[in-house]
Amino acid sequence: MSIETLLHESRVFYPRNSFSSQSNVSTQTLYEQAHQDRLSFWESQAKKLLWHQPWNQVLDWKRPYATWFEGGKLNASENCLDVHLATKANQTAFIWEGENGEVRTYSYQALYEKVNTLAFQLRHRFGVQKGDRVTLYMPLIPELAIAVLACARIGAIHSVVFGGFSSASLKDRILDSQSSLLMTADGGYRRGKIIPLKEMVDVALSDPDTPIKTVLVVRHTGETIAWVEGRDVAYSQVMEEPHFMKPESMDSEDPLFILYTSGTTGKPKGIVHTTGGYLTHAKYSTKVVFDLKDEDIYWCTADIGWITGHTYVIYGPLSNGSTVMMYEGSPDYPDFDRFWGIVARHKVSILYTAPTAIRSFMKWGRDYPDKHDLSSLRLLGTVGEPINPEAWVWYYEVIGQSRCPIVDTWWQTETGGIMITTLPGLHAMKPGRAGLPLPGIEAKVLDERGNEITSGGGLLSLTQPWPSMLRGIWGDSDRFESVYWSQFETYFAGDGATVDEDGYVMVLGRVDDVLNVAGHRIGTMEVESALVGHEGVAEAAVVGMPDLVKGQAILAFVTLTEGVSASEILSKELIAHVSQEIGAIAKPQKIIFTPELPKTRSGKIMRRLLKNLAEGKAAGDTTTLSNPGIMDDLALKMQATC
Ligand code: WTA
């Protein structure tokens, strides 16, 4: 298997008539409406939600600060639950399959009841007020979705921390958001093993600075766990008696959640999303991009700990009243056909997953999907990183059986929802090219000076404010302005892109020091700080190395402190150390020990040269280095180890 170069791809695929003729969008009307009057287009989308009070103004834009639907009042949980009760109380909201095979379903009525009870308890028993932060550190179980919606119901700001992060990462996020309550589970299942979440929580909270007063614990694995009296409370006990909780009337611009994501420097950024604009886009984009219908069984495989899970497992599909599949575990457990068994068992019709997963499926071979009946599928999607055409075509032919259109959706934690894609019933698909800005979204590829490029490569920018745009970085407006708004007049996404003669955008990946490992954003700085935090390490430089399955793998160049010598054991220890500091997703694949790192005369590490080495290219211009000879040494070491 090889990653083809995207630039030579010229195949074009068309949606079938049978798909287009039934699709939610089969004409240019939405594009035309949005083009004629963008704000009234967004206003008409917002009107599809239930508001307690209408807005005074659609958009107030004081670059880089946007206010959407100012004066409007609504509640996100009410828009995902209460609004459906009259017509869909008995319709299934969630079908959940545990890794061990257990299946649970929740109707809209049942989900509504659980959310109400938890919301009531959060408010009346634990005193969580509107605007307070609540951290959720959970496996992918229905209780996580219940907790998200319960927070939204009382206007508490949820901060979901992916269960794969370490206790140190969890602690940093708790401290940054100043959460007073944390909800977790005893553990979660991953590839048959138990991830001891509660144990990690106990370690994180052993720091006396953490402001958490209550830890709500869901019993999931049943393992023995430590219990801190007065702090830990069993979720089951809290949920014993049903309660109703009136949804809090939130301002359109009240924060709905914080979600941490990696940046180039320093600690992860707490991206802030607000209520009205975010929900407007979540509902609209889910409906048009996934062609969502009442009969669909819709499965987005992302964990709720990532933005994709927030928008396309919870808020988007539930605000549309659809039936959502959730699977707790790993795609290769107990065997490589787990996903295809789920599709067949639950008659999944829409599948939204990541290129890294698709490349794994390719590697495991088509026998696994071929064993199952995939005829329920009618639409496929991908997100998280560029998809190489070879994987795209495999997904199309083997999983979609050349019947299902594919939406390759480009967006980010910061954008809140999908920005660039083709619409499945309307557009031709070009493998490797995400497509066009959605109706209502304006995107351009710019050169370094901010001039638009109409063919060829440049930097991707969103050139008009949009409702679900991030409103800031929690507690750090300077960083918000400098990261996203200092490069251009318009929003800078951090991605390189090309655009073709039809206006189709191909996203090439990050142009900054953010890595994309298996669709997860990891800052080089975070990994470097973790490495340097080990007593044996003097300096570290981390770069991405092409990886056939994960897109990128992490390569770390490390210099050791005096008296410490390089060894295989130390290499393993450092890898484990990063895993402990950040989480297993940030583990370096390889450590290369070196007596020095390439540096300019002013002492700046030249990561670009290391990146070239990692990508198997010539090092490049070494004349500005204070130690030019080091690159030859490193090239030899790379050859010997990789
Ligand atoms: C990358 C995930 C190419 C991109 C929703 C972006 C993509 C980063 C695509 C955001 C795609 C996401 N094609 N690249 N279809 N989708 N990316 O914040 O580099 O976890 O900036 O949000 O993923 O990652 P994040």
Image (cartoon, rainbow, N blue to C red):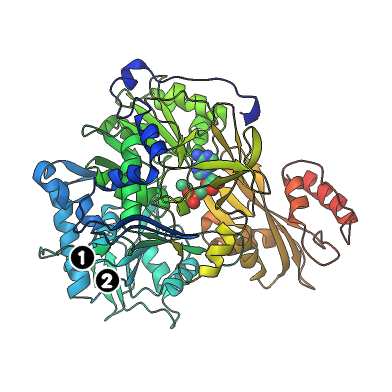
Look at 26% across and 30% down and name the residue there. 347
Look at 27% across and 57% down and name the residue there. 55
- Amino acid on which the number 1 mark rests in the picture: Glu
435 above or below 540? above
Q: Which residue is mark 2?
A: 130
Q: Quadrant of the N terminus?
A: top right
Are the residues tagged 1 and 2 within 8 Å (C-beta)? yes
Element at label 2:
loop
Name the N-terminal-most of marks 1 and 2. Answer: 2
Count of numbered tags: 2
Element at label 1:
loop
Q: Seen in the image, is 128 located left or right of residue 460?
A: left
Percent x, y for residue 621?
85, 49
Q: Which residue is mark 1?
A: 248
- Amino acid on which the number 2 mark rests in the picture: Lys
Q: Is mark 1 within 8 Å of ligand 1?
A: no
Percent x, y for residue 563?
79, 73
Percent x, y for residue 468?
39, 52
- Residue 415 visible in the displayed image: yes
Q: Seen in the image, is 270 located left or right of residue 42?
A: right
